[in-house]
Amino acid sequence: MTSVTEAISRNGVAEEKVTRFDIHQIIQHALLMVSFILLVVTGVPQKFHDLSISQWWIGVWGGIEAVRSVHHFAAWVMVIVCVYHLLYLGYTTLILKRPFPIKMIPSSEDFTKFFQEMGYFLGLRKEKPKWDRFNWREKFDYWAIFWGMPVMAGSGLILMYPVLATKFLPGWIVPTALVAHSDEAMLALIWIFLVHTFFNHFTPGVFPINTSMFTGKVPKERYHREHTLEYERLFETTKEKKE
Amino acid sequence: MVVGLSLTSSFTEIYALDENNCLLCHDNPDLTKTTTGGEKISLYVSEEVLNTTAHRFIDCTTCHTYEPHKAATPLTKLSLAEKCGSCHKYEYKLHLQSIHGQQLVYGNPDVATCIDCHSTKGDPHSVIRVLEYSAPAYKKNVAETCAKCHGDPKLMSSYGIVEKVYESYMRSFHGKAMQLGTYEITQLDKATCTNCHGYHDIKSVHDPGSPVAGLDNLAKTCEECHPGAGVEFASGFLGHKEASPENIPMAHYTDMLFTILLTTVVSFGALVVLMATIRYASNRWRE
């Protein structure tokens, strides 16, 4: 993760935008998003096979064989993205010796601020809590993948190669993988389209679309509003540098 | 282009063979007879149906004898298979070994005979070829055809057969792939009822000779499509039942665990979104 300090000094403080993500993070998110959407549009009709809309939709793709091929392809893309992310994390911290992104690690402060935010939503507080680089939702989305990916990829591989899987795993693993794959997929899909999309695109100030994850840049004013603590810290350091 | 045109224009309607002009009388929807028991039965044979049937070039007398009017009831459910078997000898031999055939020999009219699986309208005159898309025995339609009887709880209760076999098949990988696939024969390389249970010589699952009786037989049946599948693979089959504490408990408890997780997380997310929506809306309203 490129620290924002560097990014700002590279772009100049006078810039109206702050660089939040580097090119690797942009690529990782884009591929994750595309593969996720492909998996959803090819997976959901297989789960709800009884609906006539599913049957129509699978016909649009050219039949179940085509849908399954795309589903498998997108699954491999998603697995590769996750491996890419882990390699990227290892390379930037171990070889480039960048500081470990501790800001992503949940802390007790997050829980306090979470309740403060709920208090704000309920009208009990006048102000939203001030966040640092990541708010609780961003951390939740990030860490949820560490649970979701092993479940989805593990069960998906068992379903893709059931004969191979039962060579060294018990037979019940196949029907079990199916329920896990199907249920966990619904969880991920509802969370992403309900919570992730709502807070990242449909909240005041960003509606209708938040482009920061695609361009890597966030308008300065919004950065101050959404990541106040980090923004203030960055400005102080840049001021010091200038002096 | 010229050839194409001449080909299409040379198409003529195909008529069923009727050497003895039976249809002169029998193509009348009102033609009936009263049996000795006083029952009124229809003697109508639709020419339109006959024209598309698989046996349209086989004369009526082949099945109905040369003196059909002297025979009281030429063909009944119990005698039909024998009649079909006079030409389809191999299929008849297998049918006699099947649970359906054996029950017919005992005089049980509940079970399936030739036309129950091969005729679109359930009568011998509308038997069509298996490779026609609308044929009840066309692979895509097989499960539905079996379900005509095996999905009927009333009929199945007297035989101790799970009536949910059709539903559980449709829920399975095989059923989904079959349902979501097209009618193209090249896309029908998925298992349907007959792939595991057999067809003309179909056995009861309690018969040790059934391809699905016991894990060893089942594994061999799986291997026909899944090379290398062993007993362990076969043991993962839910047996047309839902997972339960007795039937593959791991799948049952995993489903429970994930359902709890799903409900909790989604409710939490929905609540946060709802609260945020109300707050943002009221912020806007106050402005």
Image (cartoon, coloured by chain):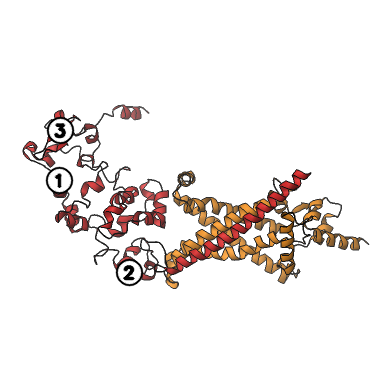
Chain colours: A orange, B red
The image's mark for residue B32 is 3
* N-term mark: 3 or 2: 3
Residue highlighted by disc 1: B76
- At a point 69% along the width and 47% down the height, the residue shown is A209
Which circle, 3 or 1, is nearer the viewer? 3
Q: Secondary structure at mark 1?
A: loop
Chain letter of the residue carrying label 3: B
Q: Quadrant of residue B164?
A: bottom left
* Marked residue nearer the N-terminal end (3 or 1): 3
* Whether residue B85 is visible: no
In which quadrant of the rendered view does residue B132 lie? top left
Specify whether A138 is left or right of A16. Answer: left
Badge 2 sits on which subunit?
B
Using residue B242 as the reference point, say whether residue A101 is left or right of it.
right
Residue A94: quadrant of the picture: bottom right
Question: How far apart, in angstroms, are the residues tagged by discs 2 and 1?
Answer: 39 Å
* Residue B66 coordinates in the image, percent (x, y): 7, 38
- Vertical position of residue B59 compared to residue B190: above or below: above
Q: Quadrant of the N terminus of chain B?
A: top left
Q: Amino acid at mark 3?
A: Thr
Viewer-nearest residue: B133 or A177: A177
Expressed as whole percent of the image width and height from the top left, the position of residue B21 reads 13, 30
Q: Earlier in the sequence, mark 2 or mark 1?
A: 1
**Relative to A110, is A152 on the left or the right?**
left
- The residue indicated by pointer 2 is B215
Mark 3 crowdedness (10 Å alpha carbons): few <14, some 14-19, many ≥20: few
Tag 2's secondary structure?
helix
Q: Position of residue B120 (x, y in %)?
A: 27, 42
> Is A2 situated above or below A94?
above
- Do pointers 3 and 2 mark residues of a single chain? yes
Q: Are marks 2 and 1 on the same chain?
A: yes
Q: Residue furthest right?
A: A243
